[in-house]
Image (cartoon, rainbow, N blue to C red):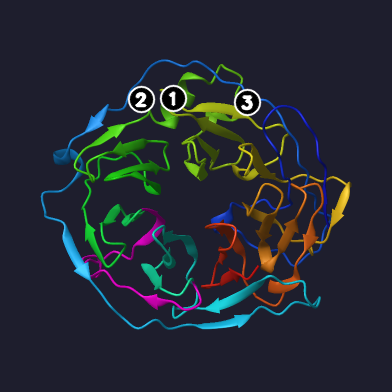
Amino acid sequence: MVTLQLLTDWSIQTLRASSSSPPRRYKSSSAVQALSTRACLHHNPQSKPTTTSLPSSLSRRHLIADTAAVSIVVSSPLIGISKPAKSEVGGLSEWERVFLPIDPGVVLLDIAFVPDDPNHGFVLGTRQTLLETKDGGKTWAPRSIPSAEDEDFNYRFNSISFNGKEGWIVGKPAILLYTSDAGDSWGRIPLSNQLPGDMVYIKATGEKSAEMVTDEGAIYVTSNKGYNWRAAVQETVSATLNRTVSSGISGASYYTGTFNTVNRSPDGSYVAVSSRGNFYLTWQPGQPYWQPHNRSVARRIQNMGWRADGGLWLLITEEFEEIPVQSRGFGILDVGYRSQDEAWAAGGSGILLRTNNGGKTWIRDKAADNIAANLYSVKFINDQTGFVLGNDGVLLRYLG
């Protein structure tokens, strides 16, 4: 059972759930235990650090290999099967499962649609998975990138973003893809190994412009289609924490990992959770460094993100007994907002929860109870289009 509690104190809303594993390595437990979720608000303190630096810009010579970008054009018929996800409560489910033409074991990591064509989108994940839809997500067809397949790497595509017809994809090992024709053709821009960390997130911000983030806290921006990149922060998170170990940030003195999760708000602010979940960091445009923050309680942080009203939500392990919500003993891993009042939470073993009052109460939707998969990410493209991404190639589509 999950319970929720709503508190108020400044700007962070906290959603607490039982699970001790990071989202991408989450292992569901068969033991049914008392779980809890609560929401609370608190103030984000900001420190004023100064020192070590990253280069203020990366030239094409340092960032982009000398090889020319390889353009590919692929066309294939859309295939896929769409079946309603069965719910144990009649009329409750607002989701259906879309069966994808991919191998078992693939973890879906991100999804995006072309703004000028809301029916045209892409979903990506591990094992070099890239699928395309032209009917709003009802059916999907695999897309291949010959220039990547010629190598010995099995790329993990981490993030995708569109602005107009321009789109970007980043992955691991370091790979950057760009399209200017809504994904009809993708050009690869090979990258050097001089970027600190692995690229985990990219955001298309304007014409020929993008912002990308690594798991070590480097943020780079381009305004000329990737020809040059400029550092938005002056140092990595490790360098920041090495300077602030005496500032009272719990866990900073033995920080050796990377980001577990990172999320961006519409205004360009970021929130990231440390790999151990023992503290979190925030960054706003114009700040030279990431700002580390103590967690509110001595529990592991699972994930953090942005609410529709601009505040933060937070998933953390803790036990409360307030507003009871059935979660069958499995943890919550992500929250996605359809509107300021309606949000969906997803987690281990097909857990789906819905709130219609900004998180004060939650109702369990049993749509995915019979799906043997963990649901890692909830993405709403707009108030009519939403998806839930999971492991083993599980994709749920919002029906409304």
- Indicate whether residue 139 is drawn in magenta: yes
The front one of 164 and 126 is 164
Task: Read off the magenta span.
Answer: 137-163
Would you say residue 373 sits in the magenta stretch? no
Q: Amino acid at mark 3?
A: Asn
Task: Residue 383: give x, y in percent of width and height.
Answer: 59, 58
Q: Residues within 10 Å of mark 1 (few under 14, many from 20)?
A: many
The span from disc 1 to disc 3 (Cα, nearest Å) is 15 Å
Q: Which residue is mark 1?
A: 289
Which circle's residue, 1 or 2, is located before the other in the chain? 2
Q: Residue tagged by mark 2? A: 234
Q: Quadrant of the N terminus?
A: bottom right
- Image coordinates of residue 192 in percent, x first then y, are 21, 46
Amino acid type at image mark 2: Gln
Identified at 44% across, 81% down, the residue is: 101
Measure how far apart labels 3 and 2 are at the Cα level. 21 Å
- Judging by the rendered image, the residue that carries numbered circle 3 is 44
Q: Quadrant of the C terminus?
A: bottom right
Q: Nearer the viewer, mark 3 or mark 2?
A: 3
Callouts 1 and 3 close, C-beta under 8 Å: no
Q: Earlier in the sequence, mark 3 or mark 2?
A: 3
Up-down: is 381 above or below 265?
below
The type of residue carrying mark 1 is Tyr
Give residue 128's position: percent from left, percent from top. 36, 67
Give the answer, above or below, for where 83 lies relative to 131: below
